[in-house]
Amino acid sequence: MQENANRAPESVERLLDSTLESVDSAEELAVGMAERAGVDEDDLMKIGMAVRESMVNAVVHGNRYSAHKKVRLSVAANGERFIVQIADAGEGFDFASIPDPLAEENLLRTSGRGIFLIRSFMDDFQMRHLESGGTEVTLVKNLVSK
Amino acid sequence: MSVKLTTRQVGDVTVVDVAGRITLGEGSSALRDAVRDMVSKNQKKILLNLGDVSYIDSSGIGELVSGFTTVTNGGGNLKLLNLNKRVKDLLQITKLYTVFEVHEDEAAAIRSFA
């Protein structure tokens, strides 16, 4: 919870290359905007991690590091909500196929925790298939005035 | 800065001081390579000191798990030392905190391998 009534709305959109450098850039951009929106340190960490995990999914699993595919990033803070959208240009995947990383049989898997962590850190998380075939995720952190 | 790994021997326990970011790419690869190297040298008592880890993502957690299973399957033990709040919270959220043996004191951690 943080004071934000007097902070100006801000939004930005970027088309990023499918590289690990873009993951860093996206995290830095989102955390910077969240900080200006008055988000506290604990939530800044959560937003940073959620954006990082989402970008990794887009770059690695969606676009498979393709130099021909971009990741669309949009970040907006409007006083009430902090919203991040990340879209890849991949082939999409079955959302129901994501294994539960907390299930006993999955605990010692070396991957598969990204989406779980995003859901844990954000107040809302949605995924949708794009008509073009890729996947778009929307991450929301509520900004509540005291 | 990515990750910096410094290995030292305390008796028959190999202590790896990890500093920096364990994230997808350089960081997680370096940790993976270090554990594999220790296993190839038949080092069976490994203590990862994570006190100076500033950031870890799900890939980094995956490498901790991978290292744990690799060492355990080889008849060894891999334990964790000095978790900061971020790493501890992540391991708790992912239910891995009870999988690993975690210590806050190096001397006690070393003794636990006996």
Image (tube, coloured by chain):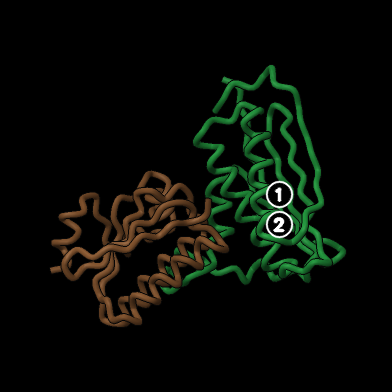
Image location (x, y in percent) of residue A136? 75, 56
Residue at (60, 68) in percent of width and height: A98
The amino acid type of the residue labelled 1 equals Thr
Which one is earlier in the sequence, the residue at label 1 or at label 2? 2
The amino acid type of the residue labelled 2 equals Met
- Residue A103 visible: no
| Residue A5 position by quadrant | top right
- Give whichever of A56, B6 is nearer the camera: B6
Assess whether mark 2 and mark 1 are in contact (beta carbons under 8 angstroms).
yes
Q: How many marks?
A: 2
Residue at (57, 51) in percent of width and height: A119
The residue carrying pointer 1 sits among few (fewer than 14), some (14 to 19) or many (20 or more) residues within 10 Å by Cα, namely some
Q: Label 2's element?
A: strand
Subunit bearing disc 2? A
Q: Label 1's element?
A: strand
Image location (x, y in percent) of residue A21? 67, 55
Chain coloured green here: A
Q: Which mark is residue A138?
A: 1
Asked if residue A79 lies left or right of residue B82, the reply is right
Asked if residue B40 is positioned above or below residue B93 in the image, the reply reads: below
Asked if residue B108 is positioned above or below residue A39 in the image, the reply reads: below
- Gap in Å between the C-alphas at discs 1 and 2? 6 Å
Image location (x, y in percent) of residue A3? 59, 21
Residues flagged by tags 1 and 2 on a common chain: yes
| Residue A34 position by quadrant | top right
Chain coloured brown here: B
- Give whichever of A59, B32 is nearer the camera: B32
- Residue beneath disc 2: A127
